[in-house]
Image (spheres, grey):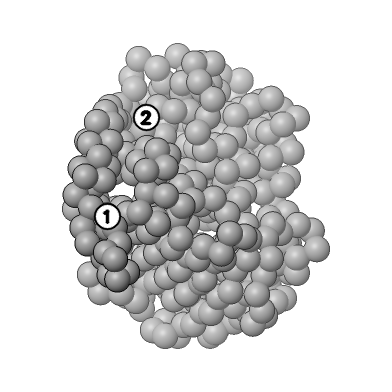
Amino acid sequence: MIKVGIIGSGSISNAHIRAYQQFPNDCQIVALSDIYPEKSKQQVLQHELNAEVYSDYNKLLERNDIDLISVCTPPYTHAEIAIAGLNAGKHVLVEKPMASSLEECDAMNEAAEKSGKILSVVAQNRFTNPMMKLKSVLETGLMGDIVHTQVDSYWWRGHSYYDLWWRGTWEKEGGGCTLNHAVHHLDIFRWMNGMPSEITAVMSNTSHDNAEVEDISIAIGRYENGALAQVTSSVVHHGEEQQLIFQGKKARVSVPWKVKASTSQENGFPKPNPELEEELQKVYESQPDLEFQGHAGQIQDVLSAIRGDKQILVDGKEGRETLELITAIFQSASLKQTVNLPLDESSPFYTREGILQNATHFYEKTTSIENFSNSEITLGRKMDS
């Protein structure tokens, strides 16, 4: 039985708790920690847990019976807590984004390597039927080379969203919608299509004058073979319609699922290619459905890796690459330059201090409240609908 401790009792931790509870024969939540311990105590009652509550996460880490921790705290604390957990001999599952800087990511990966423990970064949208099926379709190569990718990470958040004490600042949140909302789409985009060789981006704050950070960014990625990708990250889009579209030389596919294929007439104009469309459709439909999706799917992956049954799908190196792509967007938009990838210590945005010094500050944070009375999280349109 794998014993689990959860650090941070904000809204996202409930998804972790519910996911762990789907595997009662494999794991047990035995401890919760939050700087507001009353929130953890409420979760114990709400989820009917037999767990101890700590206001200091270090006390939780001192327990020898805990094998795995979930880190569900604000981004600027991820590195410190994850490294402490790894050094204490625990496996670590850390919420997105992995950390506030590439320097912190590298320190986390170094701690994982030294400890021999698993470090996994939450990317629960990979663990969904549409994403796994689309990944399988792309891997067939039936579409030909991918020449253009469109990523629409459209969300909407009201002005008060950034009133929460840790949101809306580069120091504590680490960035705006590009980091904390589009991270899922950017992770999937990179996982499916690889890293571009350069990024050119712009960003703005159009609707939230109580936040330092961006509420919309638009980035263009260029690959060495000339292929392009365009990524829009936003919290100003009503309807929150999200999609990823991959245009190949022979066909296009997307989430939400859609397939179109064309061949050329003698004059260069298109005509449908129903045979290829049918072949791609069959590949998509032939993929088995996942037994568990979302956080439960990822936690199943982590538990299996701890038992030695498989390799982890989303490790610290994967998490670092996604943050690297986001960091390149911030660097390009702030310094008004095209940024070459990969990024290393020479990047002015490699450290948290470098980000604070160089990132564009749109406004000053004007309000800071400890907690909202309503902790409900509403999500945009599912990308499989």
Query: Going from the N terminus, do you reach mark 1 or mark 2 first?
Result: 2
Picture layout, residue 187 above or below residue 200 = above
Q: Which mark is residue 217?
A: none
Q: Amino acid at mark 1?
A: Ala
Q: Which residue is the site of mark 2?
A: 20
Residue under the image location 50 percent in, 20 percent down = 310
- Percent x, y for residue 329? 58, 69
**Nearer-the-camera pick, 163 or 385:** 385
Residue 170 shows in this picture = no
Between 138 and 359, which is closer to the camera in this rendering? 138
Q: Residue at the location (45% across, 55% down)?
A: 146
- Residue for point 22% across, 36% down: 282
- Write down the quadrant of residue 343 in the picture: bottom right
Query: Which quadrant, please, contains the N terminus?
Result: top left
In the image, is residue 30 above or below residue 110?
Answer: above
User: x and y percent of residue 57 in the render?
Assistant: 58, 40
Q: Secondary structure at mark 2?
A: helix
Q: What residue is shown with label 1?
A: 261
Residue 65 is at least partly visible in this image: yes
Question: Which one is in front, 76 or 96?
Answer: 96
Q: Secondary structure at mark 1?
A: strand
Q: Quadrant of residue 360?
A: bottom right
- List the single residue furthest toward the right: 346
Closer to the camera in the image, 122 or 129? 129
Q: Residues within 10 Å of mark 2 (few under 14, many from 20)?
A: many
The reply, left or right, for residue 34 in relation to residue 197 is: left
Residue 44: x and y in percent read 35, 35
Residue ranking furthest to the front: 266
Amino acid found under the numbered disc labelled 2: Tyr
C-beta proximity under 8 Å, tags 1 and 2: no
Q: CA distance from mark 1 to mark 2?
A: 42 Å
Q: Residues within 10 Å of mark 1 (few under 14, many from 20)?
A: many
